[in-house]
Amino acid sequence: MRLGDHRQAVAIHRQATGSEAWHLLPAEHRAAHLIDITRAHLDLGDPHAAGRALVTADAIAPAETRIRPAARTALTAVLRAGSPAADVTRLAATVGLTHP
């Protein structure tokens, strides 16, 4: 993703998260990866996939999603992209970015 090829980053992300090895990683590492891939989804114009990544990260490791500044920044970007899903709105309320 750092090289600017967000499509390739998402393709590699899908391969990695679909493998059996994905579940062998510590929960915090999986959540951090999902938080990081949010930017690629947003840059590709897919705020729904970005929101799903954050909600999944929160289900895997809530502290990583709720405390990590990058997660709050990513969540704010998803909210600004418009029409967030209900679970994204609930996550935003949980971390204090919106009022329930």
Image: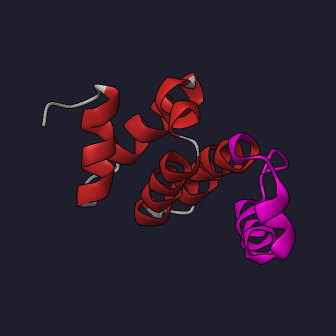
Reply above or below: 77 against 96.
Answer: below
Is residue 72 or residue 83 the one in the foreground? 72
Left or right position of 3 against 99: right
Q: Residue at x 56, y 54 (%)?
A: 43
Q: Residue at x 87, y 67 (%)?
A: 21
Return the x and y of residue 53 as percentages of the image width and height. 53, 57
Return the x and y of residue 61 as percentages of the image width and height. 58, 42
Reply above or below: 71 against 44.
Answer: above
Q: Residue at x 39, y 35 (%)?
A: 76
Residue 7 is a magenta residue: yes
Q: Residue at x 52, y 36 (%)?
A: 65
Reply above or below: 10 against 94.
Answer: below
Residue 95 found in image quarter: top left
Residue numbers of the magenta segment: 1-28
Return the x and y of residue 57 as percentages of the image width and height. 55, 50
How would you classify the magenta stretch by its main secondary structure?
helix
Left or right position of 72 against 7: left
Is residue 68 or residue 80 the one in the foreground? 68
In what quadrant of the picture does the C terminus appear?
A: top left
Res 75 visible: yes
Reply above or below: 2 against 12.
Answer: above
Residue 20 found in image quarter: bottom right
